[in-house]
Image (cartoon, helix red, strand yellow):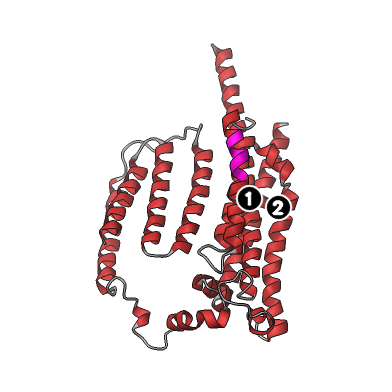
Amino acid sequence: MEGMTVIVKTIASWVKILIFVFGIYIILFGHLTPGGGFAGGVILASSYVLLMLAFGRKFVEQNLPLSLASKLDCIGAFLFALIAVLGLVYGGVFFVNFLYQKYLPGQPLELISAGTIPLSNIAIGLKVGASLFLVIFALSVCCKDLRYKDAKAESASNSSANKKE
Amino acid sequence: MTEFYILMVFMIIAAIIAVETKNLLSSVICVGAIGFGGSLMFLFLRAPDIAITQIVVEVLGLILLIRATISRDLTFITGDREFFGTVISVVVVFVIFLAGVRVFETLPEFGTPIFAQTPGAASQTYIEKGLEETGAANLVASVILDFRAYDTLGEATVLFTSIIGATVILLYKSRKRLEESD
């Protein structure tokens, strides 16, 4: 099964970028409006899930290889830990908001404000999006193989039944 | 308050249908209805952060479940259930129901958080000083990424570890199976 019909493919190719941009908006404005790293990351992953459903698994694998996804996952986790350790180095306390307190106060309600909170949001968004994409990809591979195995066993039993008849 | 009761009755009915129906796809759809009811409830309780997360995770989970269940007929457990098991489960559900009734009796009235009455509580401090200490307009973000960032670090670690493990096991198994089938 390689993707769905032409209608679904066309709509998906229009909608995918909207979903992706919405996910980026939710992540970047997480410190101002409802949302944040986790929700935005899941939206990013769901745009790729839409592609996977509409165009098939191989198309997505060409666009976003598994190795790249796992690298993004690790980079996100590393960035989040790095922000925490930078707080220890520059602020004296683990996870302290050193950017806001010392270097970049910023005005509230502006995009560049709140110090390390947007950076942490970006890191968490990267991590959650890549890891959810990874696990859904793995599950779809597993499901497809299971189905393949089931179909094979079914056809084998059918053929044996036919032979008996 | 009425919308909560309407939503609650809707979710309970959906849960009963999800358990009792014979069709796997309609059962999955009922599970999705429960999740969307929960997200609507969060919206009415003025918690849009959680509502967004709930609805997004619900959509992803629903897609996964439908993808896994569609075009596959699973065998159902048929036949009479055991008498002893039924009695045990009814008793357990009744005890949990009684405990829930007692808990709801001791809850404070709706809209009056219990921490607001005690002076010097942590949540009051977050609400009063959240903006000036972190500069984030969204208080939820300032709590989960500044005041309580350790929680988020633990959550991220749990997610990272579990997903790495699941991915490794699933991909390894399917690769092995593909090699066998070849």
Q: Which percent across, then down, holds residue A126? A: 66, 59
Which chain does the residue under circle 2 lie in? A
Tell me the crowding category of disc 1: few under 14, some 14 to 19, or many 20 or more residues within 10 angstroms, Cα based.
many
Residue B105 is covered by the magenta coloring: no
Residue for point 64% across, 36% down: A56
- Which of these two is toward me, A148 or A38? A38
Q: Which residues are magenta?
A: A9-16
B63 to B45, vertically: above or below: above
Q: Amino acid at mark 2?
A: Ala
Tell me the SS state at disc 2: helix
Residue for point 53% across, 48% down: B60
Residue for point 44% across, 80% down: B123
Count of marks overlaid on the render? 2
B136 to B161, vertically: above or below: below
Which chain does the residue under circle 1 lie in? A
Q: Quadrant of residue A28?
A: bottom right
A27 to A3, vertically: above or below: below
Residue for point 50% across, 40% down: B66
The reply to whether the C-beta atoms of the residues labelled 2 and 1 are less than 8 Å apart is yes
Q: Is residue A130 left or right of residue B97?
A: right
- Which of these two is toward me, A122 or B106? A122
